Amino acid sequence: MKVSKITSLGLFVALAMILSFIEHQIPPLVSVPGIKLGLPNVAIVFVLYGIGEKEAVAVSLVRLLLVSMLFGSMMSLMYGAAGAVLSLTVMILLKKSGKFSYVTVSVTGGVCHNIGQIAVACFVTKTSELLYYLPVLLISGTVAGVLIGLLAGIVIKRMEKQKKQ
Amino acid sequence: MKRRDILLIGGILLVALVLFLFLQLGKQPGAEVIIRVDGQEQGRYSLSADGSYSLNSGTNLLRIENGKAYMEEANCPDHYCMRQGQISRTGETITCLPNKLTVTVSGGENFAEIVG
């Protein structure tokens, strides 16, 4: 791995951590647990498209571990890990298929993140009624995914311009 | 955005809508709430009698009023459970993830649900 690559991946981990922190500061709009914008995903989607798949996985997992250690708990690590692994897997598969735009990839990422988290929540509380949250989470995940995808798209375009100059 | 993208996103929203309708239609006015901690049933309280109940050796305080149950107090840091509002229809659930506690409305006579 080149030094420049290590440096930029470190930067993206830091960026994703800052975005996590900012997101933690936003008070929840509604009372359903799990509804959130997914700001750190901007960095992940950007790395996925700008650098590569393996790198996106690395940045996502390192961010998750560090953020859980700093602000979270063992539980938040479990929820986050389930969401992150599922969402990364599906995003990479869709991206590799080459048939979908990055907004759609980001949407499926957001939705899968929610599905992973609710699966862990059902498992932890051993209560299947938590599935009642799923429709709401699917919709909120879609909306958040569109916003994050558009944002990542803007950043990708601007970075390409910067590179050319 | 291509046709495929719209189809996929539309598909997700359609699944959400169908699931939502399916879950809403199954709801009926409930008779009691079941308290579970870590999946283990801890107790049942009738929705027809008003009262406050201390749950899970004091981590949460449940209030039942006018046939509706809500979380009055909780010792968890996020207080999501207190913001989840009032529940009164079957299947509706208040969740307190930090305490692994759930409060679920039940019809009271449904044997399958009692066993499950």
Image (cartoon, rainbow, N blue to C red):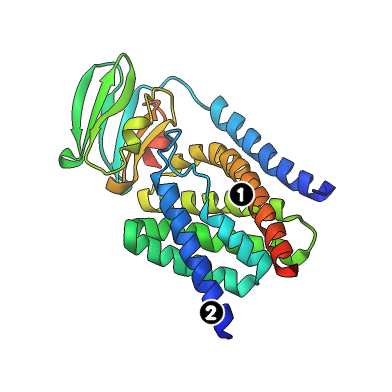
Q: Whole-Å distance between the Cαs marked 2 and 1?
A: 25 Å
Horizontal and vertical percent for residue A59? 52, 69
At x 64%, y 53%, the residue is A106
The local crowd at label 2, few if under 14, some if 14 to 19, many if 20 or more residues have their Cα within 10 Å, is few
A43 on left or right of A107: left
Nearest to the observer: residue B72 or residue A121: B72
B58 on left or right of A120: left
Question: Farthest residue toward the right?
Answer: B3
Horizontal and vertical percent for residue A35? 49, 42
Horizontal and vertical percent for residue B84? 38, 31
Q: Do labels 2 and 1 share a chain?
A: yes
Residue that carries the numbered disc 2 in the rendered image: A6
Residue that carries the numbered disc 1 in the rendered image: A148
Q: What residue type is labelled 2?
A: Ile
- Residue B34 occupies quadrant: top left
Image mark 1: chain: A
Q: Which mark is residue A42?
A: none
At x 44%, y 63%, the residue is A64
Q: Which of marks 2 and 1 is nearer the N terminus?
A: 2
B25 over B95 or under it: above or below? above
Nearest to the observer: residue B64 or residue B72: B72
A57 over A154 or under it: above or below? below
- Residue B90 occupies quadrant: top left
